[in-house]
Amino acid sequence: MCISPLIQTINSIAASAAANTTIDPGDTNVELVFGIMLFTVTGIVFIVAALFAGSLIRPKLPHPEKASTYECGEPAIGESWVQFDLRFYIVALFFIVFDVEIAMLWPWAVVFRQFRDAGNGSLALFGMLFFLVPILVGFLYEWRFGYLDWVRSDEGQKEPEWKTAPAAVSESLS
C-alpha cells in the first residue's frame, strides 16, 4: 500500500522533532494547562483593567451629536430599518469562502511535489479533491440558479403577500 512511506516520513519527522526538544521530568500536562489558563486569565485581567482605568480617566462630555449614528463620518439619513440588498452579502460570502479555499490550497500546493516524489501523489490529490469538490458543487449550484447574477430577473418570482392582500386587511392594518 502507498500509505506506509507516508507513515514512515511522519514518524521520522516526529522523531527528529522529539530529539531536538528537551522535556524536564517535572513537566506534565497539568502544568501545561495551568500555564495556558494563567496566561488567559492574565490577558483578560489586563483588558478589563485597561477598560476600567479608561472609564475613570477619560472626560465625560455627553452631547447629542456624539450619540447619533453615522457611517464612515456621514450623518445618517432616513431610518435604519432599510432592506439590505442580498447581492452584497452573497459577493462577500463568496469572497470569504474562496479566499479561505486559496489559503488552504497554498500549503497543499507547496508540499504536493514532495508527496508526488515519494509516490503518494494520488493520495495527496484525492485529499485535496475531498476538500475542493463540495465547494465546487456549491459554486455550481449558485451559478445554475442565478444567485451569482448581479441583475436577476423577477420572472417566476412569487408576488409578495402584502401586495396581494385584500383591501379590508390592508385597511385594518393602517
Image: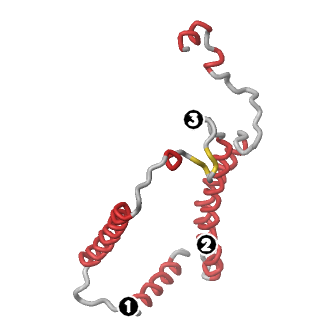
Would residue 87 be found to the left or right of residue 7 on screen?
Answer: right
Amino acid beneath label 1:
Thr
Amino acid beneath label 2:
Trp
Q: Nearer the viewer, mark 3 or mark 2?
A: 3
Q: Name the residue beneath numbered marker 1.
A: 21
Q: Name the residue beneath numbered marker 3.
A: 81
Comes first in the chain, label 3 or label 1 = 1
Q: Is residue 92 above or below residue 146?
A: below
State the residue in front, 31 or 141.
31
Residue displayed at 48% across by 81% down: 10
Which quadrant of the structure image shows residue 141?
top right
**Badge 3 element:** loop
Q: Position of residue 69 (x, y in %)?
A: 55, 45
Q: Residues within 10 Å of mark 2 (few under 14, many from 20)?
A: some
Q: Position of residue 112 (x, y in %)?
A: 63, 76
Q: Position of residue 62 (x, y in %)?
A: 44, 50
Comes first in the chain, label 3 or label 2 = 3
Q: Name the residue beneath numbered marker 2.
A: 108
Residue displayed at 61% across by 19% down: 162
Q: Residues within 10 Å of mark 3 (few under 14, many from 20)?
A: few
* Marks 3 and 2 close (CB-CB < 8 Å): no
State the residue in front, 159 or 137.
159
Amino acid beneath label 3:
Trp
Q: Is residue 46 above or below residue 79?
A: below
Q: Which mark is residue 107?
A: none
State the residue in front, 102 or 128.
102
Structural distance between the alpha carbons of marks 2 and 1: 27 Å
